[in-house]
Image: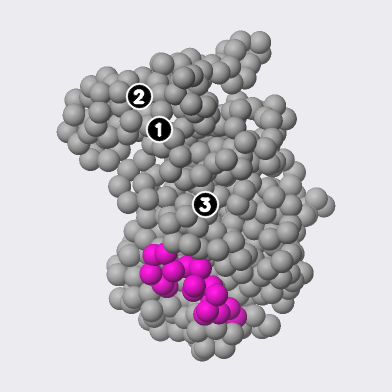
Amino acid sequence: MRDVAVVGAGMIDFGELFEQSIDDMLERAYLNCLDDVDRGMDPDDIDGAWFGTIDIANNASSGLGLSHPTGLFETPVTRVENACATGSTAFRSAVEAVRAGSADVALVAGAEKMRDSAAGLIESAALEQVWRGRGVTMPAFFGLRATRHMEEFGTTREQIAEVSVKNHENGAKYPHAHYRFTCDVEDVVESPQVTYPLNLYDCCPVTDGAAATLVASADVVDEYTDDPVWVAGSGLSVDSFERGKDASLVGFPATEQAAAEAYEQAGIGADDVDVAEVHDCFTITELVTYEDLGFCEKGEGGAFIESGEPRLDGETPVNPSGGLLAKGHPIGATGVAQVNEIYEQLRGEAGAVQAQNDPTYGLQHNIGIGRNATGSVSCVNVLATDR
Amino acid sequence: MYEPPFTRDRAANERLAARACEACGWVSFPEAREVCKRCGTHGEWSDTQLAERGTVQSYVVQQRLPEGFETPLPLAIVDVPQQSGGEPARVYGLFTETDPDDLEVGLEAEAVFRRIFDVDGLPVHSFKFTLPRGESR
């Protein structure tokens, strides 16, 4: 298996981008990514591309949705959809192809038009669609974990709110974030209730965006940069709350399983992670993810955020980009943008949100839901400064 | 428009009909699969009937929903035992005629038969949950 490195990263400013089509967003993210490669990238060098989108606005399905805005024709392009883990799964798929030797340089691009037509369970107009998930909307699915976590471990409403406070503080400093305001615990707890126990400031916004990443094999990496960021490990797993450990309702075993695989490949443990971009579609999601990734013991997520360890100036900064809560969650782009942020953190190029602990290992994580809201899918990628 | 998914699930929705894996005892509801989600066995299943009362494992109260849903709308994960004993089934359920403030993890919930919504004029029926109002009911 060949070693693989990230050699370029590009994205657009996330937000409500009514003036841009999905092609406009993808083209700009792609061009920004090409420009980011230290020694430049000839598009002819790209011998495979993976396009992540759940195609929520019904306008970009299949690989053609990437080849048209990028001009990458006569190139194998694969469209990837894996619920909210779409972007990270697209990245993992490109990495696997380069590891296997079927491509030397691969493009990963993710994009989502969320505001044109926020369909499905997110803003469903149809009772039938919601009922197929037996009445479970997104905030309900994650809120059920919050109620159970508070009941079982005594996690407080204020501890859950601290996640939002931290991520908005980071997002206010992050140039590509959709929301750039700060808030305090009182703001979160007193914001309008969406689905008890979650309020408006516990929820990520509905955001348009695109992001692109270039990966290359160790054989050719020197052609592009002297400062590559290596892919140390990758894991992908699915689970269901109808079985096994997931029945506990206090976290996502799919995340534990994906992380275990990624850590094993990287030869590290959770303690070695210096900076992380994790899936905070809701505040509670990030809180239980601390536990699922092994940053703290199960049940101690509330104490972990309260300790300040995941803050930008803490021991293990989590979501320096502001996370989904502030940066936004254009589903196909989300995981790709997270990878990009870890790439910049490990190169020391993260500007106002640079982790101050001289990070050598960075982790990226997504969790998605599906199967009538009974299943979850998680992808975890670990990047490293050293090969 | 004809809506087959709701027709396929009628036995589960209307009669709380479920199936139990003979290898590990796991209860499949409302799906009827050949492969057990827990033990992975591709084996035998027995028909089973769920009880009308189960225990709330977690809950939320939905305040923002599409048109057609009344809010606030409590929703819970309820573990519902089989009438014949054995393991409970894990079930999502909307609550009806329940004050959200009365909900707690661990409470007993009762399944009641309700018309859920119409698809082009054709009614779809299923269970909802409510908090029991005493044993005389």
Q: Quadrant of residue B31?
A: top left
Answer left or right for A208 relative to A241.
Answer: right
Q: Residue at x 41, y 24 (%)?
A: B52
Per the image, label 1 sits on a secondary structure element best described as: strand
**Residue projecting furthest to the right:** A19
Q: Report, in whole angstroms, how far the alpha carbon at label 3 lies from the one at label 2.
A: 25 Å
Image quarter (top left, top right, bottom left or bottom right) of the C terminus of chain A: bottom left
Part of the protein shown in magenta:
A294-312
Q: Are marks 2 and 1 in contact (CB under 8 Å)?
A: yes
Q: Report, in whole angstroms, how far the alpha carbon at label 3 lies from the one at label 1.
A: 18 Å
Q: Does the magenta stretch include residue A311?
A: yes
Percent x, y for residue B76? 51, 39
Q: Which mark is residue A363?
A: none
Q: Which mark is residue A147?
A: 3
Crowd tier of the residue under label 3, counting other residues whose Cα lies within 10 Å: few below 14, some 14–19, many 20 or above? many
Q: Which mark is residue B54?
A: 1
> Which amino acid type is marked by label 3?
Thr
Toward the viewer: A222 or B47?
B47
Percent x, y for residue A95? 42, 63
The answer to whether A349 is drawn above or below residue B107 in the figure is: below
Q: Which mark is residue B50?
A: 2
Residue A239 visible in the snapshot: yes
Crowd tier of the residue under label 2, counting other residues whose Cα lies within 10 Å: few below 14, some 14–19, many 20 or above? many
The colour scheme used here is one colour
